[in-house]
Image (spheres, grey):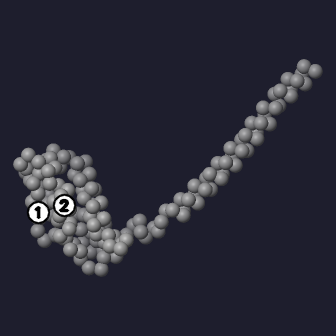
Amino acid sequence: MADEKDTAAVEAPKKSSKKMMIVIAAVLVVLGGGGAGAFFMLRGDSAEAAPKKGVVTAADNTITVNLADGHYLKLGFALQQTEAAAEAVDLSEAYELAIDEYTGVKVAELSTEEGRAKLKADLLAKLIKAYTVDGTKEVMDIYYTSFVTQ
């Protein structure tokens, strides 16, 4: 009789752990399927994520920007447009955004690759926003043709 009680006590947890494993597996399958479905539904159009390159519009002149502590930056650039842009964009707003982005920046920040990359990424984000018309991005990158600090 003592052996029967011990055997019954040992078997009971095995059954509940099997049930628990089945429940956990079922929950993971449901969550995984829901996650995959949400990913495919919400990911958007792949053409929107990677626009095709169009023409490159180069600025005719370089600009000079006042940096911090009496230094300056001489900057020239070109904009990589998307294929969606029917014609060359007007660079007036790009000049203004570049001046606003770099005015007052310290030379030490521009002398490191990380500092230049961060400022360029910030400027590019502003350019893309400024040159998006009716939900269509007309600019996708900026190339520096001149970058001199003193």
Task: Report the residue at 32% width, 73% height from top.
Answer: 133
- Image coordinates of residue 87 in percent, x first then y, are 26, 79
Q: Is 54 drawn above or below residue 13 in the view shown? A: below
Of the residues shown, which amino acid type is indicated by label 2? Answer: Ala
* Along the line of sight, the residue nearer the viewer: 38 or 62: 38
Q: Secondary structure at mark 2?
A: helix
Q: Report crowding for label 2: few under 14, some 14 to 19, many 20 or more residues within 10 A (C-alpha).
A: many
Q: Is residue 78 left or right of residue 3?
A: left
Question: Residue reaching furthest top?
Answer: 2
Q: CA distance from mark 1 to mark 2?
A: 9 Å
Residue under label 2 = 98
Q: Quadrant of residue 121?
A: bottom left
Q: Position of residue 120 (x, y in %)?
A: 24, 56
Is the residue 133 above or below the residue 7 in the image?
below
Q: Residues within 10 Å of mark 1 (few under 14, many from 20)?
A: some
Residue holding disc 1:
63
| Image-based side of 127 in relation to 33, left or right | left
Q: Position of residue 5 (x, y in %)?
A: 88, 24
Q: Residue furthest left?
A: 70
Any mark on residue 141, and which? none
Three-letter amino acid code at the position of disc 1: Ile
Marks 1 and 2: CB-CB under 8 Å? yes
Query: For the N terminus, which image quadrant?
Result: top right
Farthest residue to the front: give it: 134
Q: Residue furthest right?
A: 1
Q: Position of residue 112 (x, y in %)?
A: 20, 46
Which residue is painted at 17% across and 55% down in the image?
A: 102
Residue toward you, 76 or 20: 20
Residue under the point 83% across and 31% down? 11
Is residue 11 placed above or below 25 in the rendered structure? above
Q: Is residue 118 visible to us here?
A: yes
Earlier-in-chain disc, 1 versus 2: 1
